């Protein structure tokens, strides 16, 4: 997985290794106050845990998801505890107009974005390639590969506009190392060639 460092009009891809320190060690909360994290696929699982951690560390959080049940649960259990620091939107990350709305609402509420976690992804079937439908292929590629690229494009534009030193993290799971029909295999490859 890669990480982008945005400084002024310069974007650097930084290959990060897992931290060697204690995973439970708390980070400096001062570093996250007045900062905003945008997380896709954020109302369940890893995305939700990431959003909760950013909130615990003092950051504002913009979360989006398409699952109504997960969105309701997130609003009830997480947003209620941090009402001034959370923006929760139902967004289809494959829809360009919806992504524009996501970034407009984030900018309106918090002014800028410092961190992006491209967490959205699907793994619908383990169909053999000969049995996979074109519709399934298109859906998986749109969510797992194209959407993170389009979110990153908008995030970089906003970070440059506000001269934000930010980070963009793409979650690809094991699929980023051992490819299968999930469409996540190319993610680590494309992030090195994005700019």
Image: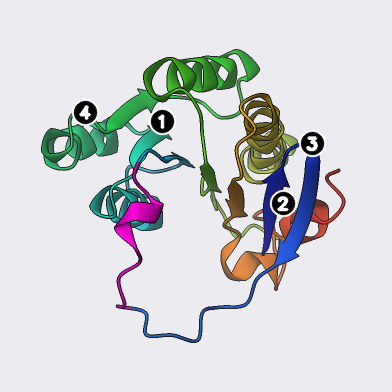
Do the numbered discs 2 and 3 sit on residues whose CB atoms are within 8 Å?
no
Residue 70 vs residue 114: left or right? left
Badge 3 marks a residue whose secondary structure is: loop
Do the numbered discs 3 and 4 sit on residues whose CB atoms are within 8 Å?
no
**Mark 3 or 4: the one toward you:** 3
Quarter in which the N terminus is drawn? bottom right
**Mark 4 or 1: the one toward you:** 4
Residue 175 vs residue 31: left or right? right
Q: Which residue is mark 1?
A: 66
Residue 71 vs residue 20: left or right? left
The residue drawn where x is 51% and y is 34% is 113
Cα gap from disc 3 to disc 4, whole angstroms: 31 Å
Mark 2 Cα within 10 Å, few/some/many (few <14, many 20+)? few
Badge 2 marks a residue whose secondary structure is: loop
Vertical position of residue 157 compared to residue 132: above or below: above
Quarter in which the C terminus is drawn? top right
Q: Which residue is mark 4?
A: 84
């Amino acid at each position: 997985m890669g990480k982008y460092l945005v400084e002024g009009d310069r974007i650097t891809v930084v290959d990060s290794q897992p931290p060697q320190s204690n995973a439970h060690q708390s980070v400096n909360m001062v570093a996250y106050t007045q900062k905003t994290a945008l997380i896709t696929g954020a109302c369940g699982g890893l995305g939700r845990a990431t959003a909760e951690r950013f909130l615990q560390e003092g950051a504002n959080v913009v979360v989006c998801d398409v699952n109504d049940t997960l969105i309701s649960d997130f609003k009830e259990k997480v947003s209620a505890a941090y009402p001034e620091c959370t923006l929760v939107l139902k967004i289809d990350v494959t829809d360009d107009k919806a992504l524009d709305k996501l970034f407009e609402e984030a900018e309106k509420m918090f002014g800028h974005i410092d961190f992006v976690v491209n967490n959205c992804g699907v793994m619908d079937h383990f169909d053999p390639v000969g049995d996979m439908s074109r519709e399934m292929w298109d859906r998986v590629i749109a969510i797992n590969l194209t959407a993170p690229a389009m979110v990153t494009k908008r995030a970089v534009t906003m970070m440059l506009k506000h001269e934000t030193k930010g980070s963009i993290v793409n979650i690809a799971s094991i699929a980023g190392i051992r490819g299968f029909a999930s469409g996540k295999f190319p993610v680590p490859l494309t992030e090195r060639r994005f700019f």
